[in-house]
Amino acid sequence: MEKQVDKKFTWVIKNFDSLESEYIQSDQFVVGGCKWRLVAYPKGKNKDHKLSLYLKVDDYESLPSGWRRHAKFSFTIVNQSRGVNLLGDYFGRRFGLQHLFGVDLNSPCWGFPAAISLTQLNDKNGGYLKNGELKIVAEIDVLEVTGESVVSAESEDAISPLKKIKLNDDGAETSSVYWVHVLPSQVQYVRRIFEKHPDIALEFSSKNPHLRTGYMNVLLSITNKLCQSPQVLSNDDLSDAGIALAYMTDAGFKMDWLEKKLEQVKEKKKRLEASLARLQEMENSIKPLKQKYLDQEAQIKKENAELLAAKAPFSFDDLNL
């Protein structure tokens, strides 16, 4: 069972815990004018009992010489017991990287040879397997394109419908630089960013539509991440956001407003962690007092019982007359 939404591809592997195949492949899907598949080695490509996951260019042998795609991609091994967060992102083990796929580079497949240990994956309390099913979500951004696409724009839009929007309305010929493809649900959000920060892309001059859209997806990913509660953001998340901001700045985007927001989130996370640490310290310090209170309360009950017994008069029968 496979499902694609925009640049996300969901692969549900049935009966994962009983698979005997050395490796398995997903159905073919299209992102950025390129046909892809996911490849998994259930027992590990190196037979080391660690799940191996890869992104593969499909029909690689039929592509023309010089064909290249620079792609940023990530995999999420979904924790099915936790579901999704408020932003619609899955909880689970997530990891990503960038790679230049190319015919002349002999690199049709790239990924993670040791994504997660099978011990952790098969842990009944881990939440990764549900009724024997494993769910993997792949997100792919094609950042740069060399060579013609093997899939027509119409075919790709039929699978992944995006909305083409212009980010300035001055009517100038150079406005084509600001055309990008985004999901319909993202249009207003993107417009708000450019309305508040009109100079954000003035130094970015690429006319490659895939590259522009790729950078826009990176920008949306950063802003969505920084809108999450600091409590759910790990230090790795914040580090990745910093790297992505530097990546955008190097490309010519004006990112000072987001850099400031990142520093604010980091500071807020520090205050959160300090507060949690203080609360834990207070909780630890009060535990002996709580136990002492419980012990004293038990002793008071015992003393009251003895007091009541001492106050009680003897009965006629107790006198043994």
Image (cartoon, rainbow, N blue to C red):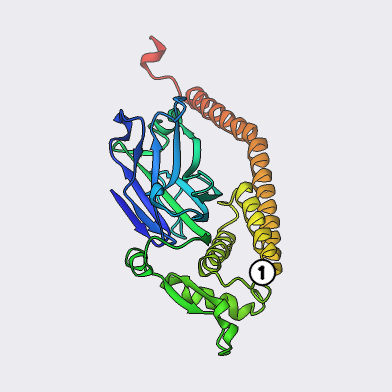
Estimate the x, y position of residue 201 in percent, counting from the top left: 64, 74
Q: How many marks?
A: 1
Q: Which part of the image, by quadrant, shows the C terminus? A: top left
Estimate the x, y position of residue 301 in percent, counting from the top left: 51, 29
22 is higher (above) or lower (below) than 206 = above
Indicate left or right for 270 with 166 as reference: right
Estimate the x, y position of residue 119 in percent, counting from the top left: 44, 27
266 is higher (above) or lower (below) than 299 = below
How would you rate the neighbour count of disc 1 (Cα within 10 Å): few for under 14, some for 14-19, many for 20 or more? many
* Tag 1 residue: 253
Image quarter for residue 26?
Answer: top left
Indicate left or right for 55 with 266 as reference: left
Residue at the image position 47 percent from the left and 47 percent from the top: 75
Viewer-proximal residue, 13 or 160?
Answer: 160
Indicate left or right for 185 with 282 as reference: left
Estimate the x, y position of residue 293 in percent, counting from the top left: 60, 34
Residue at the image position 68 percent from the left and 68 percent from the top: 252
166 is higher (above) or lower (below) than 50 = below
- The residue most toward the front is 65
Identify which amino acid the numbered label 1 is placed on. Answer: Phe
19 is higher (above) or lower (below) than 248 = above
- The residue most toward the top is 320
Viewer-proximal residue, 306 or 276?
Answer: 276
Q: SS for tag 1?
A: loop
Residue at the image position 67 percent from the left and 43 percent from the top: 277
Residue at the image position 50 percent from the left and 52 percent from the top: 73
